[in-house]
Image (cartoon, rainbow, N blue to C red):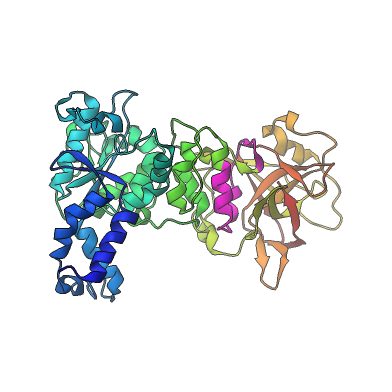
Amino acid sequence: MTIPDLFDAFIEFVFNDMPARLIYIPEMRFVAYDEVISLYTPKIADITEKDIQDQTGSRNRFDISRKEALAIVVKGAVKYAMFSHRWLSAGLEPTFQDLASPDSDWQGRTGAGYDKLRKFLEKAQVFGCMLAWSDTCCINKTSSAELEEAIRSMFRWYRNSHMCIAYLSQSSSPADFADEVWFSRGWTLQELLAPPAMKFYGRNWEPLTGDEDLEWHDKRRDSFLNEITKVTSIPYRDLFNYHPGTDRVHEKMLWASHRRTTKTEDMAYALIGIFDITMPIAYGEGAWAFVRLVEAIMGRCGEWGIFAWVGQSSRYSTGIAESPGSYRPLPFTGNYREGHYGHVRRGDKLFKPTKRGVKLRLLLVAPTSKWSDGSWSEVNNHRYKSFTFNFDSGDEPDDGVLEEVMTKVDASEVSSEFKVAVGVLNYFTVATDESQGILLPGNDFVGLLLHADPGEPGSWKRISTDELLLISCRKVTQRRLTTVWL
């Protein structure tokens, strides 16, 4: 007899944490929720109370709850594999319609797509999985509702898989990773981060890390993960055990900055699970999807780094980047190095998108302050424009340096009648008075080049620059922050 709360956990896992349609490998056919339950109920019934109790207290020397123990034993009984690969040209991949047709004899078909699918299913069985999912054929893409559910659930499906099998068709060893297209695609980013266990295969389906060890999968191989870090810049800790969320936004955008998708909107959809947000899927919206993604992230994060990008802004909002490709590494060192700036009190943490634009508090540096000559610096193959200024009471207007700032700016964007300023993003805040911002010598600050809209007080337009602007100062400076709308 099945243990009641175990059966409840089984039902919950099938309906909420598994793909809606899977291939049942022993019979090479699709199965949905109800049939998965029917197929695996006998296996769940074999689980004993001792099996559950054995899980409590056995993980990292900390006791775990019964609910967590139930989830572990259910996942161990209902194993499914997920496929991660680069798609072939249109028409070469088997579709849902190809496999679902009653008179389809797809197992006997030849072609690169079918050969790849069969190899994936073969490898899934090696790891004890009788259920498998491939994005090419397990989604009925003629159903917009089914496609939307799959896109919004995909990160979770990869997360709960027993094994993710990655096929890197251009690689024979990690030495080939720099030229491997798998690392340049948008969707494979979540397929790399989400699964707790992965096995990588290269050209001719040879394992890239030696034998197919059932216990020692590739996310347990330190040297292999270090090779992936070299080509992706994703830290080892995230490759080994990634936690989705809206923290470290700038760093995560950098991971996606060199990746591409065939459809513009897919770049945003591929990041939904990575940031652990939800948004409707609407194919045909193009670049608007990334604006909606960033607005959803803004509602849950307070990190100034979300504004540290270069180039053209979105045509839908001057306060939001055009795409992840607009983000550049930050050249900070010490406590403020890239990836750690979010752990100190810097910048506005209450910014938000509004109908008027993105509402943001900045420390404005006007042209009436004296500036030093700008200088170029280069960090990690990226160039930055650096300036130093004073706030001495006797300063006279000095527009010459500001003009130099604008040598990398399209002059057509700026009208002489507009007031121009630089808004500092990552100023320090004063705990007792958050209306004030502080700039300290010895620190680099990121600036946004802005010009005001004379017809609407408080509204500013961000002027595009090809490099990040870095600002420093010669003495401690404290100023009241200015609320702007971008």
Q: Residue at x 15, y 66 (%)?
A: 47
- Observer-nearest of 165 and 148: 148
Q: Is residue 482 visible?
A: yes
x and y percentages locating residue 218 in the rendered image: 23, 49
x and y percentages locating residue 394 in the rendered image: 87, 55
307 inside magenta stretch: yes
466 inside magenta stretch: no
Q: Residue at x 65, y 62 (%)?
A: 428
Residue 66 appears left or right of 451: left
Specify the segment rendered in magenta. 291-318
Residue 442 appears left or right of 373: left
Residue 319 appears left or right of 399: left
114 versus 340 height, above or below: above
Q: Quadrant of residue 9?
A: bottom left
Residue 151 appears left or right of 170: right
Q: Is residue 95 visible?
A: no
x and y percentages locating residue 148 in the rendered image: 43, 42
Q: Residue at x 32, y 33 (%)?
A: 86
- Observer-nearest of 16 and 227: 16
- Observer-nearest of 24 and 269: 24
Q: Residue at x 59, y 49 (%)?
A: 295
x and y percentages locating residue 109 in the rendered image: 17, 25
